[in-house]
Amino acid sequence: MSDDFDFVPRLGKIRSQGKAKTQLNRLKRAAAKGRLGTRGRKSLTPGAVRHAGRGKVQAALARHWSNQRTRRVIVKVHIARAGPSGAAGFSKHVAYIRREGAGREGERGKLYDRSVDETDAKKFNDRANEDRRQFRLIVSPENADQMKDLTQFTREFMGQVEKDLGRRLDWVAANHHDTAQPHVHIVIRGGSTRNGELLIDRKYITQGFRARAQELVTRELGQRRLREMAAARSNEAEREALTAIDHDIARRLTDGRYTPEAEQSGLSRFDSAVVKRRLRFLQTLDLAMRQEDGRWTLKEGWKDKLRALGRRGDIIRSLANLEGRKIDASQLHALPRDFTGSGDVVGRLAAILPGDELRNGKTALIEGVEGRVWSVEMTEQEAAQLPKVGGILSVGPGAVEPKPADRTIAAIAERNGGLYSEALHQAADPGSSAAFRLAHKRRLEALRRLDVVQRNSNGNWRIPADFERLASIADEKRQMLSIDVRSWLPIERLVERRAETWLDRMEPSVVDGVQGALAKELNASVQARRAWLQQEGYALDRNGHMTPDSAADLRGGELETTIGREAARTGLSYEVLKQGEQFRGSYTRDVELAQGRFAVIEGKNGFTLVPTSKQHLNWRGRDVMLNRSGRTIQWGIGKARTRGS
């Protein structure tokens, strides 16, 4: 018998049926658990989302037949819901999975569907214009590099999903090869109450997708051999990331301690040896400590630190393929979201890498003035505020303001023995609208998921006495980063630019007492900038700064140059937005200048340039109406026909 064949026959008694009857009973029980009751279906109103969706039975059956020798597949699922901007976020994710560098040869990712190898993203987005949700999947087989065709695998996988859910799905996908592990991004339309909502049971989301993917990969590559399983398990023992061994250790912890005696129940001699190796490796990472009695103590937050180490490894691998300015990976540090023990980070944006791919997140690498390279995990909204690579910025903790809704809820609960409900709210404030009270309920539902409040079976809410303090703590954990762009242009483009630049306004405190490479480069650039200004005849004061008149002249000159360039590009004339006048047009693009970022608003007969801010980022591509009042410009969604339309 070949050594590659792991089948080991085990003889039983003559005429024995073995465990066939037992397995049949298990299958029946699994199917019974997955069966939907008629009561749940009758109570499902149009547009409502329940846990009882499609695929519950199929998830139970698929999970039942899986075993340890099945090929492993990681499946991540996120249900994105249409926000205030409608389905605009859905199209952004489709564009995100088609980004440059995702292909096998570093090309743009190709979007395909059930039958077309390069499908039209715009048509898919147009069909999803009224959808209420979008299902986003990342399917990553462990042995994807050994598979013949990821595209064909995805089509077979989605065909099986359609059979399980009993419905034809509208989906697109893209294969990514920009990481050490090739994987597939799949986007499924969620539909709406008008065109039919797609409801998928929670069990199928958490188990069914993965089980079906494992089944297909196992069918192509065969079951994992014992030697493959042992090698994979052994390799994880000294890996700087959160592994399956760590999950096994966590399940056997008692008061943060691991007792070797626990290995005797449920662990083989091989697994026991691997766990011991893992614990010794965690000790070298200063995450575990062996006690005198033989037990192991795991430090608080050890799993989070392992996740961070794994993310650091991913970033280092991405840096190896990054073109442009070389980044010293030995100086790489993760910046925590809560900024514990650190202040604002000031530096140069060195790179923008993929982050949370299900939510279009990004990882920003910032070369600090002190010499460190900071990796900052950012949401899609935060990443949209970043300049292009090379720009100068500072990142700090965002301000957390007390919410008026929290004060209202706390006041009502104080008068009603710690309880809050919509009826109690209406009694306390008869003039409040239903929508206003609904907003408070949504706030409580968000805090319930963070274990701040509890909801009783009768619909009332149990509010703790220190509710406002707990709510503020919960908000701090989810606070947005404060991003301040100092220069939208790289340093090397500022030295001889005919404009007022950040080098002219830079505070000495930015580089005082700092010895990093960027700090030295900034000092040299400031000196070169002042020498160039003097050579060009611009007046400087005793501190080497430009006079206000010189700065104003440079700002005006840069703006005039930009206006001329945009007029040539668009073929439209520039229109000055005067006091009390309105301008309506389409927010088409942004231009980055030394004095800031400007929005290009194109009307029917002309265009204008106005400073933009992070509040207007989601308005790009939409019709807007501008109204100048004094020195400020009010933005609004364009409706009325005005000058420029």
Image (spheres, grey):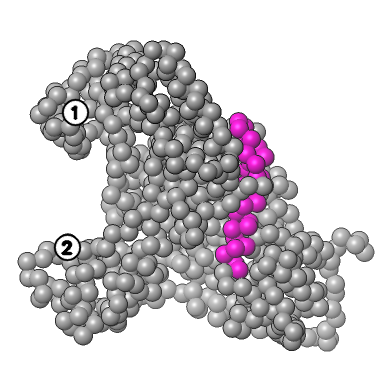
Q: x%, y% of residue 29?
A: 55, 81
In this rendering, the count of numbered labels is 2
Which numbered disc flags the more N-terminal residue, 2 or 1?
2
Quick one: 413 or 7, which is closer to the camera? Answer: 413
Which quadrant is the N terminus positioned in? bottom right
Q: Mark yes or no: residue 96 visible.
A: no
Q: Residue at x 40, y 54 (%)?
A: 397
Q: Residue at x 12, y 27 (%)?
A: 579
In the image: residue 619, left or right of residue 104: left
Write down the region rendered in magenta: 302-329
Q: Mark yes or no: residue 206 visible.
A: yes
The part of the image, by quadrant, that contains residue 504 is: top left
Which residue is situated farthest in the left direction here? Answer: 431
Q: x%, y% of residue 476?
A: 38, 62
Label the magenta part by its dominant secondary structure: helix
| Few, some or many residues within 10 Å of mark 1 (<14, 14–19, 20+) | many
274 over 96 or under it: above or below:
below
Q: Is residue 315 magenta?
A: yes
Q: Residue at x 38, y 57 (%)?
A: 479
Q: x%, y% of residue 386?
A: 43, 39
* Residue carrying label 2: 436
Q: Could you say whether the residue bearing mark 1 is in a helix, strand or loop?
A: strand
Quick one: 484 or 175, which is closer to the camera? Answer: 484
563 over 220 or under it: above or below:
above
What type is the residue that disc 1 sits on? Answer: Arg
Gap in Å between the C-alphas at discs 2 and 1? Answer: 32 Å
Q: Residue at x 35, y 31 (%)?
A: 597
* Residue carrying label 1: 584
